[in-house]
Image: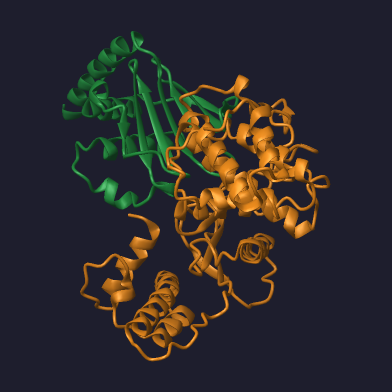
Chain colours: A orange, B green
Amino acid sequence: MSGSNRYGRFFMQSYGCESTHRHSIFCIVPPHVLREIARHGNAAQRNAALDTLALDTTMRTQRMAFQLLATSAPRPVLTAAAPQVHRTIYTAKNTQTEPGTLVRSEGQGASGDQEVDEAYEGLGSTFDFYLQNYQRNSIDDHGLPLIATVHYDKKFDNAFWDGHQMVFGDGDGVIFNRFTISLDVIGHELTHGVTGSEANLLYSGQSGALNESVSDVFGSLVKQYELKQTASEADWLIGAGLLTFKDQALRSMKAPGTAYDNNVLGKDPQPADMQHYVRTAQDNGGVHINSGIPNHAFYLVATALGGNAWVKAGQIWYDTIRDRNLRRTATFAAFAGRTVANAKRRYGTTSTEQKAVADAWNKVGVKPA
Amino acid sequence: MRVGLALLGFLISGTNMAQESSQSAPLVLKDLQGGFAGETGRVWTISPDGGYTVARQIGLKELEPDQQGRLTLEQWAQLKILLDRMAVSALPRQLGGAPQVNARRITLSYGGQQSVLNLPPAGGDPGASRSAASDDPTRLILKLADDLRAMTGN
């Protein structure tokens, strides 16, 4: 059962709601009660209440709109509440418990726990990035509260979005540092949530590699936006500072295959072009490997256009993951075709932007379909 | 008397296991969690003589084993019972549905067969899987992973 459904069902059971609907919003629990539960309930109750509040706001707005449209009276202008980030950070205390024990809620000051505070700031930076640049209200564009668990498991060497919340490991301290250390880790993982609610690219083969690449692209852009860097100033590294090896990262969008080279992990296996596409049964067909190809295409577009990469190149990629003509089984060629089409639509058929996109895919050996 | 019979039974069972497994490749179980760093986790390799190694995997790279040892005869017997119940050769190649972002994935390779169990991130609801029917392949693979973790102290 997915996390949100799990909490939704818990909430319905806990509050006596008899319903077969997917979400607990159909319960007759007023928002002020939900807010009280969010403040004073236990962890599971709090999560359920936050989920319900987020969905409830959307539904109430829609319901009001429908009611207004149904009348012939003059229609007042609807003004939705300004999008607002809502962060909650938990600690698993080095167990595999999710979400764990509440440590920091929205608006509270620093906790003094480095990972808690980095996660809190990183969630906020990612929320701001999407809102300020693409007018996206959180992961689902409906104000989804952002939840994270830090100190997950013992020496856990990863971080992931579980479909409902973020989970961060401490790293082993030998190969990996803590996973909250790099802002692009947080931007990358939250973008899986964005992709999941938009193109929902199938996590296998080329569409899976595109899913990974989109997360790398926006993870990098979140970092560049935070640092106010231009495309030429950015390092285009993914996970810089995460590895304990000096000056090494997990992936490079500028030069895939060069992010790391050491005696423990060996050499970065990412290809930069189709000629070196890696065929493997592991990793769902190499989704973390072949993402190097579309990653490099994005880097080429961004540096060709210059300026801040999130403004034009990022906008074209964002338009593409929201493009209803992009299928969830898209190949590199199909995705490339949609980026060219979106560049044309937004900037014009003979535009510099459209040409930069087409040229970039050509350089990595992908012919836009 | 009962202990003696049990020991005799175990030795016979152990002999059969040794004979069977001497003709087969090692049992390899990978328990990996997808995430930012690709798939990371641990790999258990049990050779036909009961020797084992445990190594970490990071992305496509399996690191040098950081732990090694030998299973006791009792542990061998426990594994044998479980593997017999699993009928590894009859396990589906894919269990648990389509691949999803940041899945937990358990891969069992044994006797020339391979079976991959896809679970939700962090394993989803292990209680539900573990309370499935006793011959449910998902439950058996999860039990094998749990047993190996316990036997090797991970």
- Residue A315 horizontal side relative to residue A306, left or right: left
What residue is drawn where x is 26% and y is 20%? B89
Q: Is residue A22 above or below residue A60?
A: above
The location of residue A209, given as percent across then percent down, is: 53, 36
Quarter occupied by the N terminus of chain A: bottom left
Q: Nearer the viewer, residue A312 or A33?
A: A312
Which picture quadrant has residue A359? top right
Q: Is residue A271 left or right of residue B148?
A: right
Q: Position of residue A146 (x, y in %)?
A: 53, 65
Residue B92 is at least partly visible in this image: yes
- Horizontal and vertical percent for residue A260? 72, 31
- Residue A7 vs residue A367, the one in the foreground: A367
Relative to residue A76, is residue A49 depicted above or below?
A: above
Task: Give the residue drawn at x 58%, y 45%.
Answer: A214
Is the residue A98 above or below the residue A344 in the image? below
Q: In this orientation, which residue lies closer to the viewer: A317 or B128?
A: A317
What residue is drawn where x is 69% and y is 72%? A110
Q: Is residue A268 visible?
A: no
**Residue A353 left/right relative to A45:** right
Q: Residue at x 31, y 27 (%)?
A: B93
- In the displayed structure, does residue B17 sit left or right of residue A175? left
**In which image quadrant can residue A337 be found?**
top right
Residue at the right extreme of this rendering: A233
Outermost bottom residue? A73
